[in-house]
Amino acid sequence: MSDSYLIKGVSVVGGKPTDLLVRDGVVAEVGPGLRAAGAAVVDGDGLVALPGLVDLHTHLREPGREDAETVESGSRAAALGGYTAVCAMANTSPVADTAGVVEQVWRLGREAGLVDVQPIGAVTVGLAGEHLAELGAMADSTATVRMFSDDGHCVADPRLMRRALEYVKAFGGVIAQHAEEPRLTEGAQMHEGEVSTRLGLTGWPAVAEEAIIARDVLLAEHVGSRLHVCHTSTAGSVAVLRHAKARGVAVTAEVTPHHLLLTDELVGGGPAGGPYDPVYKVNPPLRTAADVAALRAALAEGVIDAVATDHAPHAVEDKECEWAYARPGMLGLETALSVVLDVLGPEWDLIAERMSRTPARIAGLAEHGHDPAPGRPATFTLVDPAARRRVEPSELASRSRNTPYAGLELPGRIVATFLRGEPTVLDGKAVR
Ligand SMILES: NC(=O)N[C@@H](CC(=O)O)C(=O)O
Ligand SMILES: [Zn+2]
Ligand SMILES: [Zn+2]
């Protein structure tokens, strides 16, 4: 593989076409009409260069469910989706609640070498919500964990949540909360509303999310610590976040691509078939069109800071079964940019902000989230916004197939991704 690349005629984050010279891992020069003997030339005509995307919320399933995803297969899916860094959730088996497990995940990410894999540590031992995990040991480990989450479960005990928020202040950490009051979602199968009533499924009310976010922003304010809200899904949650931010609370929030595009109506029957298709089962559940509209507006405005995929691969037997027995979760890495492009349109600066710069800052990933500019790490992705693609589950790099977008035509295609000057994707294909 070449060690320098000349990308000709590319638009950097929507600007006028220019050339990018990549050498020794960094962007060496930016400007029109560049020449470089020996450099591999990439035709950037019609392409947009974005800072490499950063996912705050990825389930890689290793260790424990390597049949559904591995660090390597998930890293490949991420690179193909334009990502250069992913934060790996802790709900593996064993749980990532010790320095040993987070170091293992970090090392597997390095070995795969396709994206930077930043492990997230569990807040409580075994995600059981009873005792704080060894947060300090995970922070001090090779994986230098700064974000902690019991995702999949809510840290429901307010005293434990308070102590976790207090603890991570010492090293500038953040608690990422899966906001779900468990007493309000017992047996829940989908969003509580008209559709759940019609289908006869137990509802997951919006207030179960909103009540926890309200409590947690107050706790974060009280102890002067940082809170991050995972997969925000309701208009009411947006209202709580807006209020907290106006008060100066150190809270950030993410939204998933699926909550920006899909609604609970799909549970009653999607484009591909009849009702109760578990591909639409996810936590938090798909909500209403009014929620979708509020989430889109909040993302544009900045009340929601980032798009995060919540890429949640599941094996066929856990997904292609009766609705009630299916695991919640959807794939996201390989379709996220296309969905966001569909939702926001070609607002490149906004897309760079919500999918790269801000998530890099939230996760504390200093090498990520920088627009390609001289002296910066050559860590970026090239998008063809004119291309349209039909999502074909069998063509995905993920080991799982549970995409809710099968058969759907979406705008945009990732042509190439570079991580510190090395291509991880070229001509739309992973380099390994
Ligand atoms: N989102 C989901 O529906 N599932 C996630 C867990 C989670 O993000 O809560 C999973 O691990 O499968
Ligand atoms: Zn969650
Ligand atoms: Zn998750």
Image (spheres, grey):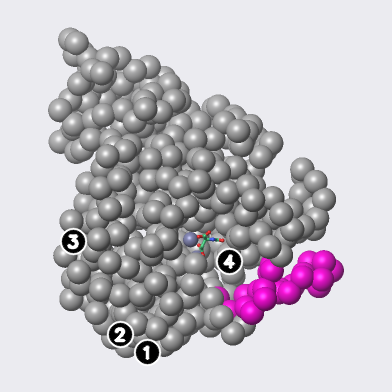
Of the two numbered discs 4 and 2 on the same chain, state the one appearing first in sequence. 2
Q: Which residue is mark 1?
A: 159
Instruction: Tell me the number on the disc at residue 237.
Output: none
**Mark 2: C-beta under 8 Å from nearest atom of ligand 2:** no
Mark 1, Cα crowd under 10 Å, few <14 / some 14-19 / many 20+, is few
* Mark 2 residue type: Arg
* Mark 3 residue type: Ser
Residue 26 in view (yes/no): yes
Residues marked 1 and 4 touching at CB (< 8 Å): no
* Separation of marks 4 and 3 at Cα, in angstroms: 32 Å
Which one is in front, 141 or 161?
141
* Separation of marks 1 and 4 at Cα, in angstroms: 24 Å
Of the two numbered discs 4 and 3 on the same chain, state the one appearing first in sequence. 3
Q: What secondary structure is found at the residue carrying circle 1?
A: helix
Q: Residue at x 62, y 78 (%)?
A: 185
Which of label 3 and label 2 is nearer to you?
Answer: 3
Q: What secondary structure is found at the residue carrying circle 2?
A: helix
Q: Which residue is mark 3?
A: 141
Residues marked 3 and 1 touching at CB (< 8 Å): no
Rendered location of residue 294, percent (x, y): 59, 64
Rendered location of residue 317, percent (x, y): 64, 51
Q: Residue at x 64, y 79 (%)?
A: 186
Q: Which residue is mark 2?
A: 163
* Separation of marks 4 and 2 at Cα, in angstroms: 25 Å
